[in-house]
Structure formats: structure tokens, C-alpha cells
Image: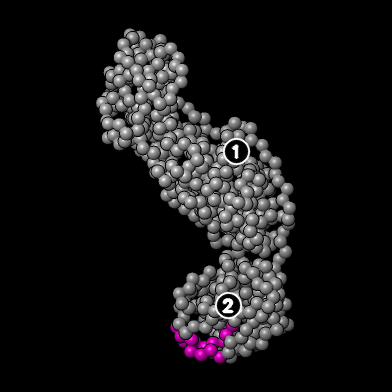
Amino acid sequence: MKKLLPVLFLLATLPLLFACTKTPATTTGTTTADTQQTPDPATIELFINENQLANYTIVYAKSPYDARTARSFTTEHDFFKLIANDIANRIYAQTGVALPVRKDTATEEGAFEILVGPTNRAESDPIDKLDVYKTYVKVVGSKLVVGGGYDSTFYTGNLKTSYCFASTYHAWDAVEAFLSACIEDGSDAAYLPDGSDLSGRASLTTVACIGDSITEGYLASDWNLHSYPAVLQRILWKDHLIINLGNSGRTMRDDLGNHYRGTAQHTALRRHATLFDYALIMLGTNDSYFDRTWPSTSDELYLSSADKLVKDLTDKNKDVQVVVMNCPVYYGNEGSGSPHVRALQNTLPDRLTKQGVNATFFDMHKFTADKVGRANFPDLLHPNDKGYAIMGEGVSELILALDAGTYEYTLPEVEGGELLSPPTRVEIAEGAENILGLDLSEVYPLSSGKYTGWHMPGTPYLFMDLNVFSGYTITNIEIPVVSVEKGDKYTVSVVKYSHPKVTETLKTYTLTADYNAGAGWAGFGGLSIEVPEGYTLAFGAASDTLIPLYVTVPTTGYTFYGCNNNSINTGATLAFNVYGTK
């Protein structure tokens, strides 16, 4: 973990830029800050461009959060005000001078001001709000400008609004260190002349939150404000930068077509990996949704993808602490966050540790089940604002324990985490050949999309070019589906076409599913569908106008067509197994 240090690098040039003197000066009077501590005896007097500190007002910037946001927060959100009051207290402790604290829009501009944050005063304009680690402390005429970067959208990869106030909070450390150095030197007064610059960089503990929609904040009233990383930032605002790198719908597995490593957030992760102290990884909920069959080969696909993601981090930052967070609780029955994936997640800390990674574990499943509860999961999968707030509070305790070096974990026991059974496959008729000559379940795995809809009225009408089925009698057809029940009806037609028109529909057949498949292959056996020369098969509701879909299967040159500009998943378009005899 990075340690937060005062910004002192310019103090080495103190004789050139600043001055301390043992000749005391007279103070003209004091006023009262909004809040203050009991002062120590005044030990030093500060002059800003030869002006007595007692003449000054601390003026803070308007919060970037608007009034609507203020109503939705449950904690103090006006961080520039909090920082201004903290500066007033620190000034009081070192000098005995109590200064008034005012909001920039609520007070007329004066000659003697300490400006905190991006105020509406012209002197605040040079503050770079996007460099979150930058502290800015400079004397401009009779004003002392104090601020820092606060808008962390630069780091998120998708321009999420995320505010960090830690660098502004710690900007005053440099002034405090300067005054302490003068006191230790036995001086009675300290001078910051015009142009004095104590700007530097704050060393913030930086946390990257990597995950899917539950990290990004889906279902929150405002993803930017109420995701768990946003809540975490507000809780740990003084010393931490929280970066939300969540992307909805993403998987850990690289083979599923919706993988995290193909996102802008992953690009941002690699770009900024050297900054991270902690990387919280919560991916897996969508993996088991998109691959409901999960054969044994899927285990290694998940684990090897996790290895690659972590390597993307550690190649650039070998010291980053990786926190594996298992899938949050899921109250539905559609396969998300399966016990088997959570059992795999249990193995990751030890697996990564053996690879030299500093890895630990957080039981998000248990935490969300125990602390968030079903009532705060409106769609049974994603938390609401309250649910995300509770998650943020729980993760803040994790981060503080990691900071302190006191965090310990116990891997949970996962009931029902055994490997799922492979899907039932239709018994192919004796002598029938796979007409396409491919195992399309490998080329386009079930996990690449939802395979429903082609058989429903009004849905796209798909057929294969080159008349590859011509001259065959079709005996078996298999189509990968999300779910099918025995007896479900599907449609296939024998057609002739001259692109882009279907010129003839010879016959339409109704297929009846042979067995139940909660997720797998719908099988149709005992068929006798004759496809004469010059004809081909079409799947789905008939249409006269056809448009090209995904142009070819690279290994065969086959082309599929469909109608009505409907967007069809590649897997759904191509993953048909058709068997027949000549």
C-alpha cells in the first residue's frame, strides 16, 4: 500500500522561495471558523505576500455534485467544504488564528482569500481537475490557491463521472510541513511571497474495481453515483482513489464472445496498472449464464482466462494486491453466478499465489446474502441504491483491513458446486453423415449466445447458400438452445431461391423436440425430409426478402442468409448440426 506523505519536495529550496524569521510580527485580530479545535499556543505567524494571515477568509468551491445528488446521498457530500474546515482547524492549531470559512457563491470576492478547490475566482483556473494525484498550492498576488485534481473520468475508460477529493484534502500538507520546518528552526514568522509554489503529488491508495454490471452499477438510479465503487470513494475519500472499471454483461472467460478483456475498461486497466495498490476482481456471474452446460473443458477456460487477466496487471505492477471476489448472491433461476463457478473462484487465490501473485479473497456471495438481502435486489440479480450502498460499506472495511495489514479470509464451502452434466445429444440415424462436416458445438459453442427465436412466428428466416443439402434425405437436426422442453415445436422448410428472393417453398415441416434440455441441444430424430437437387433447407418463419447475415464459415465457405434486417447472433445463425443420407 502506498503511504500518504506530505508534499515536501520544494521545501529543499526554502531559502530561495520562502522565508522564516525569528522577528515576531503583530496580529491585528481573529474571526471564527465554522468548526475548530482547541488551539495549541501560537508558535508561528504566517504572512502571504507580506499580508497577515488574520486578514484572510477561506473560500471553498461549489461541490460538483448537484442538488439532486445531495438529496440522494446519506452522508456529507460537500467535500470542498469539509476540506476548507479542516484547513481552518490546521491553521488554528499551528498559528492560533481562526479564519472564517465561506462558500465562493455565498461571499463577495475579497483581496485576501485562501481558495480551496476550483472556486469561481480567476486565480483557481489553473487547477488541473483531471490529474487526480496533483496537489496545487500557489501564492497568486494576495491569494493562496489550494486545490488538486478531482475528476477521475480520465482513469475509467468510459467517461464515468467519478469524483476524488483526496489530493485537494492533502494539498495543505505542504503548507503545514513548511510551517513545521520554520517552527523547528525556532522562527516566529513565516513568509510565502507572491509566486511561492508548494504544488506536488499526493500518494493515494488506488483501488481498481474490475467486474461486470454489478461493479458498473446497473439498476442504480444513477450508475455514476450509486455503484458500489462510487459509494466506496465517498467513504474513503480522504486517502483513496477508487476507479470503477466495471462493464455490464462481461465474462471472465475469453472464449464467450463477451469477455472483459475486450473492453475499453480493460484497455484502461492496462494503461493505468502501475497506479493500482489493489485490484478487486468480480467476474463469473455472466460466465455461468452464457455457458449453462459447463463441461469439464470450461473449467480450464475460466481459470486460464483469469490467469491472463491478472497477468495483464502484474506484468506492469508486480506489487498490486489482487482480491478475488466471488459472485454476489443471485435469487433467480437462470444460471447466473452458479455454485460451480463460485467453487472455481475458491481455487483462484491459491492458484495465483503459486504464480507469484499477491492474492487474497473476499466472500461477496456471503456478504450480499447476509447484509444486502433479497429486498435490495429488485430484479433478483442487481442491487438497488441501498444494496450498492451496503456493498460499498462492506468493501470499505475490506480496504481498511488491507491497509492495516490485518485482513484474513476463510474460503467458503460451496454446496452444489459439482460439474454440470453434459447436454443430452440426439441419437444419430445409422448411416447418416454430418452434412456440414463440422462439430459446430465447438466452432460456435452454446455459450456464444441465446439460441432461441428462429422457430417462432415472425422471426428471421435462415437458410444456407450453395444448396449444400441438395440431394439428401435429412434424418436428424440439432440446434443449440438456451432451453427446450420435450414436445416444443420448431419449423423447417425446403425452399428454392434466387437471391434475394425465395422462389418456391416446396414443403414446411414441424419438428417436435425429442427431450428436455435446460440448456443444450434440441434434438429432432426419426426425420425423413427430402431435399431435391436445387433446393436447400430454411429454418424459421418464411419470408420472400433475404439479406446476407454473417458472410461465411471460414473453414467451409458456406454462407447464411436471413430476412427483415434482424440481428442474429453468429452462433444462432450457424450452429446447426444436420445429418442425412444420400
Q: Nearer the viewer, residue 384 or 364?
A: 384
Q: Nearer the viewer, residue 354 or 409?
A: 409
User: Dot 2, crowdedness within 10 Å: few (<14), some or many (≥20)?
Assistant: some
Residue 167, percent from left and from top: 43, 33
Q: Which SS class for mark 2?
A: loop
Residue shown at the point (67%, 67%) measured from the top left = 518
Q: Which of the labelled discs sits on residue 455, or is there none?
A: 2
Residue farthest along the front direction in this orientation: 71
Residue 369 on the magenta segment:
no
> Mark 1 sits on what residue?
398
Q: Quadrant of the C terminus?
A: bottom right
Q: Which residues are magenta?
A: 492-506
Q: Nearer the viewer, residue 332 or 34?
A: 34
Residue 521, percent from left and from top: 66, 72
Residue type at mark 1 is Leu
Q: What's the image's color scheme?
A: one colour
On the question of residue 283 being in view, the answer is no
User: Dot 1, crowdedness within 10 Å: few (<14), some or many (≥20)?
Assistant: some
| Prevailing secondary structure class for the magenta stretch in the rendered image | strand
Q: Earlier in the sequence, mark 2 or mark 1?
A: 1
Image height of 379 relative to 45, above or below: below
